[in-house]
Amino acid sequence: MLIFAIDDEPNMLYLLHEAIAEAEPDADIMDFSLGLEAAAYLEADGELPDVIFSDIRMPGLSGMEFAKRLKELSPGTKLIFVTGYDYAMDAYRLHVSGYIYKPVDAERVREELDLLFPKQILSDCLRVQCFGQFEVFWKNKPLTFSRKQSKELFAYLVDRRGALCSTETVIAALLEEPKDMNRAKHRIWNLTSNLRAILKSVGMEDVLLSQNRQIAIRMDRLDCDYYRALAGEPFAQRAFCGEYMEQYSWAEATKARLFFDFHRQNGNTVL
């Protein structure tokens, strides 16, 4: 695991590095005194980190600005703010992965890492992001889909949470009232074949299941924020800010249910 530590105060950076090293002894840790330095490293095609622990109030490029830049440079990287100030609401709006108050210690670092990687399966599973835009990551890099609808098909199967889906069900969700049902079925079969080839290219073909001309995904082979939130993980529920698979209109029903359920669990009134 590669972890970045960012703080413009030398003493705080040293303490942060030591806390991370104690919490995750096997991690490779890179220190940066400024967010600008870390961003420049990533822009120069440096190795992408799994997690970044960053101060917020820094000269040149603040933690908030760095968070926005990070979404472009390394969208699969988890970002945890470490600060003595209360920026929680701004941090949540940016969908950052965690928030620690100074002075940081190894116990708090370990708690955040356990929330992010509870199964420690980073290297051998697909990480799926449903909150916000739908994205799929393999070894911390976006998985390339050769067809947009192959990605949408995968998103739909993730949304169905392992339920077997018939060709007709998928057609109803992904295709707008096809005039020729046979052509529509052929298109879905091609998309399924293309999706299987994409998954096979990263050794994850077993994620896709086929049975009696129906398809589904194996939930246990995915590290998915949506599934974690449904399981009650606080970090995952905190990451839901009212956005779910925003590029797909058929996902609106799930988004509405999540909004209602999470507000009810938190004791809030949904108007």
Image (cartoon, rainbow, N blue to C red):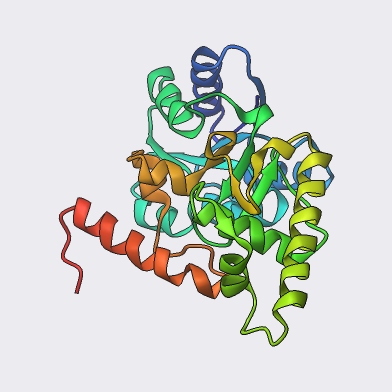
Q: Image point 49% across, 34% down: which residue?
A: 116
Task: State which quarter of the image contains the C terminus.
Answer: bottom left
Q: Confirm whether residue 62 shows in the render.
A: no
Camera-side residue: 84 or 64?
64
Residue 60 percent location from the top left of the image: 63, 53
Question: What is the quadrant of the N terminus in the image?
Answer: top right
Q: Is residue 85 above or below residue 260?
A: above
Q: Quadrant of residue 108?
A: top left
- Give the answer, above or below, for where 129 lies relative to 104: below
What percent of the width, then of the height, locates residue 81?
47, 41
- Quadrant of residue 99 in the image? top left
Q: Position of residue 23 (x, y in %)?
A: 49, 16
- Up the image or down, 57 lies above or below 218; here it is below
Q: Who is closer to the viewer here, 218 or 271? A: 218
Residue at 43% x, 32% y: name it. 115
Q: Residue at x 62, y 84 (%)?
A: 177
Kindly tell me whether residue 207 is visible in this rendering.
Answer: yes
